[in-house]
Image (tube, rainbow, N blue to C red):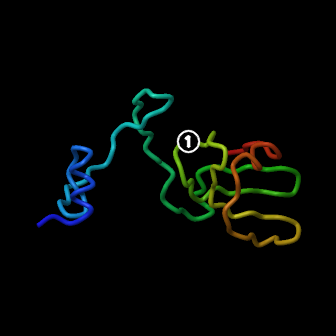
Amino acid sequence: MTKGCCEVAAMFGQVCLDCNPVKRTRRKTALVDGVARPVLKNLCGKTVKRADAYEVWQAGSWTWYVLKKWQADDDKPFARWFCDVVTPIVPQGEMGDVYVAEIKRNARRVK
């Protein structure tokens, strides 16, 4: 006897994935504007220490040490970096997520 979810899937000529699980594989491509493009691998996805920062950005007395990038494409609208930010208010540094656009708009890359 089939369940209700199987009946709905059968109406659309498909198999119910809840009752018939399939092995899911990772996509090697992503659809961008209707065209399959290769997915970029995030080479900065592992958290590192301040001395090994992927990038260093400065604006006046503020310094951002990029310790991790959450995505491979930094040009996305809400792209984030995990940074150690050194300011006059917190000279030992404070860690947290920062929007990439905010850093690029206000600072220049030094490393």
Q: In the figure, residue 96 lies in which quadrant?
A: bottom right
Residue ID at (22%, 57%)? 7
Q: Which residue is mark 1?
A: 73
Q: Position of residue 81 (x, y in %)?
A: 63, 55
In the picture, the quarter occupied by the C terminus is top right
Q: Is residue 52 left or right of residue 56?
A: left
Q: Is residue 85 left or right of residue 55?
A: right
Q: Position of residue 82 (x, y in %)?
A: 62, 60
Residue ID at (88%, 67%)? 88
Q: Position of residue 1 (x, y in %)?
A: 11, 67
The vertical placement of 38 against 41, above or below, is above
Disc 1 crowd, CA 10 A, few/some/many (<14, 14-19, 20+):
some
The vertical placement of 9 against 92, above or below, is above
Numbered disc total: 1
Q: Judging from the image, what secondary structure is the residue with disc 1 in?
A: loop
Residue ID at (78%, 64%)? 86
Q: Position of residue 66 (x, y in %)?
A: 64, 55
Pick whichever, 95 or 6, lies toward us: 6
Q: In the figure, residue 77 lies in which quadrant?
A: top right
Please, what is the three-letter code of the amino acid marked with disc 1?
A: Asp
Pick whichever, 82 or 7, lies toward us: 7
Pick whichever, 37 or 40, lies toward us: 37
Q: Is residue 106 left or right of residue 17?
A: right
The vertical placement of 7 against 29, above or below, is below
Residue ID at (60%, 59%)? 67
